[in-house]
Each structure stands twice: as structure tokens, then as C-alpha cells.
Image (tube, rainbow, N blue to C red):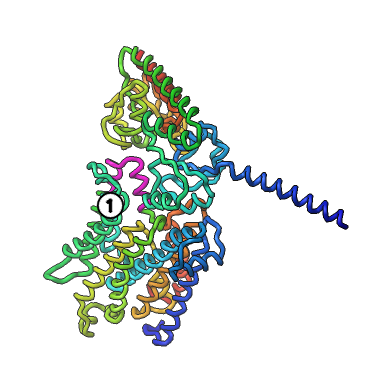
Amino acid sequence: MPLRIPAKRRIYILAALVVLMLAIGVAALDIGPLDTTCGEVFTVLKDRLLFAAADDRTWADPTIWNLRFPRIVMAMLVGAGLAVAGALMQGLFRNPLADPGLIGVSSGSAMGAVVSIIVMPYFGLSGDWLVYAATPICAMAGGVGITFLIYQLSRVGGRIHVASMLLTGIAINAIGGALIGLAVTRIATADQLQSFTFWSLGSLNGVMWPVVGITALVLLPCLGLSLALGKPLNAFLFGELEAYHLGVDVPKVKRIAIVVSALMVGVTVGFTGGIGFVGLVAPHIIRLGFGPDHRFLLPASALCGAILLLIADSLARTIVSPAELQIGILTALIGGPFFLMLLLKSRKEMSI
Amino acid sequence: MSQFHAIRIQFSLILAVTLTAISLQAESKNRIVTVGGAATEIVFALGSGDDVVAVDLSSQYPAAVRDLPQVGYIRNITPEGIMSMRPSLIVATETLGPPAAKKMLKQMGAPIVWIPEPNSVEALEQGLTDIGQKLGKTEQANEIIAEVKASIAATQEAASAWSSKPTAVFFITPPTGAGGGRAGGEGTRSDELISLAGGANAVEFKNFQGMSIESLIKTDPDVIFVGVSDSHGASPESVEAMKTLPGLANTKAVKNGTIYAVPMDDLSFGPRLGEAVNRWSSHLATAAN
């Protein structure tokens, strides 16, 4: 597999992925427990996007515009964010098994969620703001905070040693898991335990436009920054020292990759809970198909992650309707076997 | 030809009138979606069970609800799932989640009755009153409230004559040979039920927590309750097995045979609360006298 793909081909493939993503997105607008027709989807989109007058709207309008559209956009954002964070981590650690969980952002977010769902009510805190805002804020703060802690702890003489960061991450994740266990078994009520369980399996259920807005505000600049890391991460493929000799500012690239990943995963997990496997699988699908050139891998992973999550969410919304499955169950259930199949198929060509 | 035409028109008219009548009748019928065991039980107790078109997974009583479409578990409800049942009324317990789904349901503009979390007689009374009012069955609701209260009062009257206040532990999962169980502490519905039935909860921790066999022996309650259910929770056999657990042989509950299987449903705090209190109280009574 060649490392570099010709620029022209890169653009064609990316354009094809964008078209595929948008097509699935529009199709997903028509899928759901409530029956809607393609005509209604078109009318609602036309009315809303052209800011038409709001007089004769039917029930299809709130369904498509308020229930489905925001979560479809959110699925794209979350999928892209998780996939790019995974690709960055795999590039940085030069390890195909790396995912954002390694730098503590997942367990940090889970700790934040536990604090908001279980610990804060235990100390008598309650209220509307707590119910709606506390979990995303705490989960995001926890994810970014723990990543920062691991980053600081693994700094030796001002430099980050990747192996020591990995080990620090494992230790902090273990402590985090224990603290979560303590809160869940010792002070959680049955309702809180259920809320946390559902949170940890992830869901785009109940995503509203303001949430999409906040996520986009954090995610889009991070995605942009990530794309700029394509070239230096390619140099990383040969090793840190080699990258340094190729003129890459190694500490700076590490810092940006870690901060950007923590922010992207932090904000998405904060709002949608733990959605596993996308960050690991999406970059691999692209790498197995098109090689490891990060200038292509990063944008293509973003699109691949968005597509994967769009499909998973459409299934989550429909297969047990009028009930709903947790999306984390589906990403693992679909992603796992698919990933395994890809691995088995390409095992002969690969040396991993 | 014209005669045939006339017949056809007549037939069409009759058909149209009939269809309109049928559809009017269909529209006058409520389409109720209930979320939460107590909400469902109250709607059925008020005689509107036929109007219920979908329930959530936590609604298990009466048995007929298990054949209805399910809109998911009470903590994990999708607004679109509920709306797809085209409800004319939603009756839900306030613990419906996730919070965003609750907010969205309110924005969808469907008529909703929210009832308080069912964990006390007061909450049940509130729920019955609110749902009764919405369904136009205030009188029936008041009757049920009076019945439940009278039943509990009678049970408590009998309990006040006991020579002692028996202590009790409720297990939501019973201890086995391999390990401890999960018992209900302060703030749980089982705690409330024990005190309504005239007993005292023997455990002092909060919420449902793990309780080892050793600490059960140390606590040595007069009565042990185990919640059983055929869909989730323990089976009657596991309750029998508890009696033969090594180490428990010297406890009061095993020696006196005061380990009881109680329906998990007793914790639903619906219109059958009076029955539940009575059942628990009669078990406690054997230990008190």
C-alpha cells in the first residue's frame, strides 16, 4: 500500500464520501417511528432553510425539524469528532490500538457524569439547571481535566514521553474506574444507577438545536486544527526522532493533538454519553482501504465516523421502535464484526 | 340505468354516514400512552385500561399491558416513539428520562399528566387525583384513595396492638451461597413499606446496597423479605435456598421461619398499595406475637 495517494484521487474519494454522508443524512430524515413521506421531508427542509412563514405547518414539521434533524447533524459531528480523535491518537502513539480512552478523556468524562448524576444530588444539590446542564458540563470538564492531569504527570523535564503518558493513563483510568464503582455501589439510588448506565451506553436521544450549536462551536475549530496535523503526523510514522530531524516541532504537535482530542471527545461525550468503538474503527477502515497518509486519513476518518454514526443512530431509532436502543450498543455490535471481517480479509497483506 | 345510479348514490351515502360514525366513535376514544408502573396501574384502576395503546417496560401490571407496544424503559424514553402512537393523552411518572426527552415531550404539545414519583401514600393520592381529574373520573379516584387509606389505617390499627415493633430487611436480590445480596436501606420504597406495615427497617444505610451474609447475621432481623417476580428479580426457589444457607441457621428469621417471598410489584406504590401493606404487615405480625 503506497503511503501517498495522488492529490487528485484524494479529492475524488473525499468528495464521494461527502456525497454519501449527505445522502444518508437526508434519507435518515425520513426514517423514524412516525410515518413521514419524502415530500414532507422536502417541504419541511425547504420551509425551514428558506425561513418560510410558520402558519400551516403539520405535525411532520416538529418531528423532522425538532426531533430528527438536530440528532442527525449531531450524529455527523460526534462521529467525525470521535473518529478524528482516534486517528490523532493512533498517529501520535504510533499504535493501531490507541484511542482517546488512553489519555483519560473517557474515564474522566464518566467521572464527571457520575459527579453530576449521583454525587451532586447526594449533597442536596438539585434543580432544573442540574438536570439539563450539569451532566454535559461535568462530563466535558472531567474529560478535559483528567487529560490535563495525565499530561502534567507524564511530563519529564518539560518533555512528554509517550510511553510514560500511556502508563500514567492506565493508572489514572484504574483509579477513575474505582471511584465510579464506589459512587455507583455506595450512594446511588436505583434511579441514578439506571441514569448512569444509560448515559454510559451513549444516546443521541433528546439532542436539541442548542446542543448541536455548542458542539459545532467546539468541534469545528478542533477538526480544522487536526487537519493541519496531517503532514507532521506522517513524519511521526517514522519515529519521533526522525520527525524532529525532518523539521517537525514534535512537542508542539503532541500538545495540539492531545488538547484537540480531549476537547472533541469531551464535548461529544458530555452531551451524548459513552459511544464506543467509532474512534478506533473509523480510522482503521480508511487506513485499510487507502493507506496511512494522514493528509487523507484525517479528513476521510471524519467522514467515515460521521457515516458510521449516522447509520448506527438511524438503526437505534428504528429497529425496536417505538422504543429505542442505546447507540453505544450498536456501534460496538455493528463495528465489531465489521472490523473483524476487514482485519481477517487484509491480514495477509499486513504485518500487524 | 338511472335507478341503478340512484341506488349507487344511496349506497354511497349510507356508506359515508356509517364511516363517519365509525371514525367519530374512534376519535372520541382516548389513546393513552402510560409511562411508569404506578401511572399504568392508576389508569387501569380508573377503568380506562381499554384506552391505553402503549406502555413502557416498567409497566408490568395488569398482565394485559404486556401485549401492548412498548415505548422503551422509563429512564430511556424517545419522544418520537411516544408521538408515533398518536396519543391523545400521555400519563407519565416524573422520573421519566432522559431529562432532554422529558423537555421535548412538553414541547411537542401533547396533553400530559405528570404524576409524582410513587414512593408514598401522598404521592399515590396526588397521582390518582390528577389522573382522575384528567379522565373525568374524580369520583372513582376519590373512592380508590379512600379505600387505600382505610385499608392502611386498619392494618396500622392492628399493628399498634403488637407487643413489639419487629425489625425487617428487604432484599431486592437475595444473598446466595456465593455472596451477599442487595438490601433496601433508608429512602427506598421498601423502607417506606416496612414502616407503613408497622415494622422497622433493620438496615441503616441509604438506598439499595450490597449486604453480606455476615452483616445479615449481625443485623439478625425478625423478618426477612425477598422480592420475587417472574420477569425480573428473584424466584421463589432462591428464597427457599436462603433458609439452608450455612451461617443463617442461627438467625431469628430462619429459626422462626420468618423469611417471606413478596411480589416485587408491592414496591410499585400504585392503587394496590393497601394490599401490599396488608401483606407485609401480616408477615411482620407473625414475628411480633
Q: Would residue B256 be visible to someone looking at this image?
A: no
Q: Residue at x 26, y 72 (%)?
A: A257
A129 horizontally vs B2: left or right: left
Quadrant that contains the C terminus of chain A: bottom left
| Farthest right residue in view | B1
Above or below: residue A60 compared with residue B154: below
Most foreground residue, B75 or B7: B7
The residue labelled by disc 1 is A177
Can you give x and y, in whole percent of width and height, for residue A127 in the image? 28, 46
Estimate the x, y position of residue B165 in percent, counting from the top left.
31, 18
Q: Tag 1, which chain?
A: A
The picture places residue A223, in percent across and down from the top left corner, at 32, 72
**Dominant secondary structure of the residues highlighted in magenta in the image:** helix
Count numbered badges in the picture: 1
Q: Quadrant of the N terminus of chain A?
A: bottom left
Please, what is the three-letter code of the amino acid marked with disc 1? Gly
Q: Nearer the viewer, residue A175 or B204?
A: B204
Query: Relative to B82, is A219 above or below?
Result: below
Q: Position of residue A11 (x, y in %)?
A: 41, 83
Residue A162 visible, this orientation = yes
Please state the extent of the stretch shown in magenta in the rendering: A180-199
Q: Secondary structure at mark 1?
A: helix
Is residue B169 a member of the stretch shown in magenta? no
What residue is drawn where x is 21% and y is 71%? Answer: A255
Is residue A182 a member of the stretch shown in magenta?
yes
Residue drawn at point x = 45 percent, y = 22 percent: B147
Q: Nearer the viewer, residue A321 or B86?
A: B86
Front in this rendered view, residue A71 or B10: B10
